[in-house]
Image: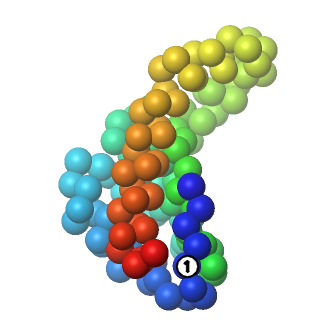
Amino acid sequence: MKIKISKDSVDFESMKTKLENNFTDYTFKERSKKFLVASKSNTVGCNILMRKNKIIVVGNFPTMTGQIIYSLSLVLLGVLIPLIIYFAVFHKKMKRIENEIGEFIKEECGI
């Protein structure tokens, strides 16, 4: 989900504290200066990336281990089997978290 904002209108640290206060059941980790990972469990979460003119919220595996395991399963088992498992088990949960956090950011940014 891409959320358009005016240039440098949102402060990353204030957005991070608002998210932490509103979503108490999620854990938030900062991967880099403008990259935040929200996780509900070890297998379901989303990435929040802040750019100059937009904020990008994408459902994804919250840990690097989960991402590596999924990538290796794509290579070793082929594309079809891991893709079916991903859509059957993970996609719906990741999309729900992405929409929750994306809607909250839209409300807080005034868009």
The residue drawn where x is 50% and y is 88% is 9
Q: Amino acid at mark 1?
A: Ile
Above or below — where is 42 with respect to 88? below
**Horizontal and vertical percent position of residue 96:** 41, 40
The residue drawn where x is 35% and y is 62% is 104
Q: Quadrant of the C terminus?
A: bottom left
The residue drawn where x is 43% and y is 68% is 106
Q: Quadrant of the N terminus?
A: bottom right
Residue nearest the viewer, comparing 101 with 20? 101
Query: Hey, which quadrant is residue 110 in on the image?
Result: bottom left
Residue 72 falls left or right of residue 28: right
Q: According to the image, what is the colour scheme of the structure?
A: rainbow
**Horizontal and vertical percent position of residue 48:** 51, 60
The residue drawn where x is 62% and y is 15% is 84
Residue nearest the viewer, comparing 90 with 65? 90
Residue 69 falls left or right of residue 90: right
Above or below — where is 57 with respect to 7? above
Q: Name the element at disc 1.
A: loop
**Horizontal and vertical percent position of residue 6:** 57, 85
- The residue sitting at the front extreme is 111
Q: Is residue 62 visible?
A: no
How many other residues sit within 10 Å of disc 1, few (<14), some (14-19) or many (≥20)?
some
**Horizontal and vertical percent position of residue 62:** 48, 43
* Residue at numbered disc 1: 5
